Amino acid sequence: MATYEVIIIGGGPAGLAAGLYASRAGLASLLVERGIFGGQVVNARLVENYPGFPQGISGIELGSLMHQQAIKYGLETVTEEVTSFVPGQLHRILTTDGDIEARAVIIATGSEYRKLGVVGEEKLLGHGVSYCATCDGFLFRDREVAVVGGGDTAIADALELSQHVRKVYLIHRRDQLRAGKVLQERIFAQPKVGFVWDTVVEEILGEQSVKALKLRNVKTGQSSTLNVDGVFAAIGLKPNSECFSQSVKVDEAGYIITDELMAASTPGIYAAGDVRRNSARQVATAVGDGVTAALAAFRYLQEQGKAKKS
């Protein structure tokens, strides 16, 4: 069984930043990613709010560059899925390709946008289907889009989009919003926003890009079609913390509770990025979390007398 000083679980911006700093510190480091290196950012057609790229950069290119930079300094990376986690003096990680151990672990598994679960959603992801108004709203300037949801995130997304688009349709399965009072006041005062109450999306239509939504009124059962150029799903997030929820403290929503150094409740375990409580869920803050976690892990190993001499 291979043993490392630090294992990072998750290859998004938080994990790659943690890997970069851990490897540069001289730690024997491994990053385990189950999918694509770069995380959710690779789904963004254009990232315009990450410092250093005034003209913006595609999400897939940004993720690739982060990966290249991390492995340049000796970080090992593998594509495997973590299936179980056993904390201890040596933390044991079970993956689809075998077991590995580490003296410190950084959990950077992120969170997943809750999907609508309808036909066309996966096919048109990145081609009109989005889960991030801040990331992609500018791409729909002077066009018509829909936001699905009725909570704080959906309202904030609709308000963000109203700064760019010609029209925003807010589609909600109920006849009243769940968002806070201040947000509701703002959205009802925004003339670009139209409301589609008691309605769910049944299908996203389009071949190369989103062209329309097939809708159903949940009270009358009546179907309709709404022509839009994009749809933003804002029905919540789910942290990817299932494997760790019995090993560290999590909040009621499943997010890992950390201190300001990204340390979780179990010694030697850290969490960074969207999987931790109170994350800002931005690429820039995820990178900062990863750096903080790696530096904290290095200090922890030094205190334990187990870090390599650099």
Image (cartoon, helix red, strand yellow):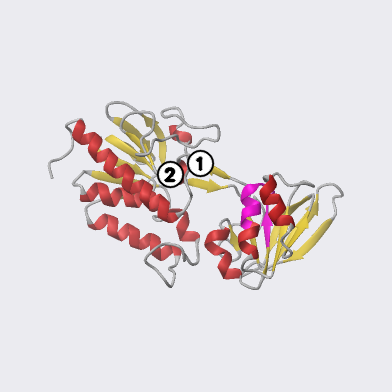
Amino acid type, mark 2: Thr
Q: Quick check: is 152 in the magenta stretch?
A: yes
Task: For the C terminus, give its image quadrant.
Answer: top left
Q: Quick check: is 204 in the magenta stretch?
A: no
Task: For the N terminus, give its image quadrant.
Answer: top left
From the viewer's perspective, is 249 left or right of 291? right
Residue 239 is marked as 1
Residue 193, quarter of the rendered image: bottom right
At horizontal 78% and vertical 56% (from top left) the residue drawn is 196
Going by the picture, which residue comes out furthest to the left? 309
The residue lying toward the viewer, choosing from 298 and 40, is: 298
Q: Please provide percent x and percent y for residue 215.
A: 77, 57
* Magenta residue span: 146-157
Q: Please provide percent x and percent y for residue 26.
A: 18, 46
From the viewer's perspective, is 242 left or right of 168? left
Residue 109 is marked as 2
User: Label 2's element?
Assistant: loop
At horizontal 30% and vertical 60% (from top left) the residue drawn is 68
